Each structure stands twice: as C-alpha cells, then as structure tokens.
Amino acid sequence: MKIGKQNEIPLFAGGGIGKTGNLAANAAALIMLGASGVQIGKYIMQAAAGCLGSETDRCNICNIGLCPKGITSQDPRLYRRLDPEHVAQRVVDVFLSFDVELKKIVAPLGRSTSLPIGMSDALGIADRNAAERLQIKYVV
C-alpha cells in the first residue's frame, strides 16, 4: 500500500483459516487487513470430504497414499470410500454458506463481496498502542 501497488499485486492469505470454527469471520479479518483472497484447502478437505486431520491430532498420512477416507489414495480399497458426487455437493454447500456469512459481515461495513479487496480502513481496535502500531482506528 505504501508504494502504491494495492490491488495491483494479489496477496493471498492462508493457514488456520476456519480453524476456530468461524471461516467467514477469519476470512473477513484477513481481507480487511489487505488480502486479495484466502486459501482454505484443509478446511474444505475437512468440511466437504471428511478429512480426519485436525490442528491437534492430525493423521498426517496424506502424502503416503493411505488416507483412511480415500481422499489422497490411489488404492481402490481406500478411494472407494470417497463418494465424489457427495463431496462435490458439499464443496458447493460450503462455498455458498461461506458467501452468505461473509456478506453478513461486510454488508454493515458498506462493502460487498464483489468490490476490490484491501479494506483495512474498516478495522478498529480498543488498544491505543496497537492501533498506532497497526495504523488503524482506535475505538473506545
């Protein structure tokens, strides 16, 4: 932003988005901080495909082809457990509900999900020192 390249160079944020259970709120915060978009790979794997991995107890076998849900496996005994039609519908459902929830968050800010991204002007914090460091609004 300081060199005048905001909205010219895309910046995508990822890692832990939705881990607290609120995908839309996490994504909105990152977008307001200037991200052009968010990456939610693991969240989609868990929500739509039934991935068993989690932040605290990951199975960590995606890379060796033994996924118990059949997601990352080439073994017919394992990948037959995955219903691609069901997963595809769940992916659509997740993204549609995410869009609705994100609109609920950004609409009161006078924003839409179709406008250019980089909305740090909408952020505020009740900690004066943090507001000064982050160069965002201090709100009481």
Image (cartoon, rainbow, N blue to C red):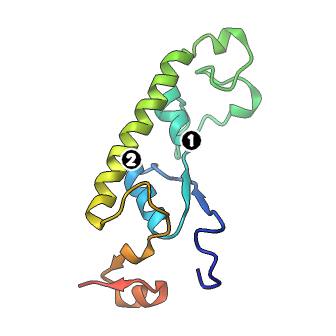
Which residue carries the number 1 mark?
42
**Kind of residue sitting beneath label 2:** Gly
Between residue 71 and residue 84, name the one nearer to us.
Answer: 84
Q: Where 81 falls versus 137 (above or below)?
A: above
Q: Earlier in the sequence, mark 2 or mark 1?
A: 2
Between residue 57 and residue 103, name the one nearer to us.
Answer: 103
State the quadrant of the N terminus.
Answer: bottom right
Q: Where 108 falls versus 114 (above or below)?
A: below
Task: Determine the residue located farthest toward the left in the rendered image.
Answer: 140
Which residue carries the number 2 mark?
21
Q: Specify whether 80 is left or right of 87.
A: right
Q: Where 46 falls versus 65 (above or below)?
A: below
Counting from the top left corner in percent of width and height, residue 116 is at: 49, 63
Counting from the top left corner in percent of width and height, residue 61 is at: 69, 32
| Residue 37 placement: quadrant | bottom right
Between residue 22 and residue 55, name the one nearer to us.
Answer: 22
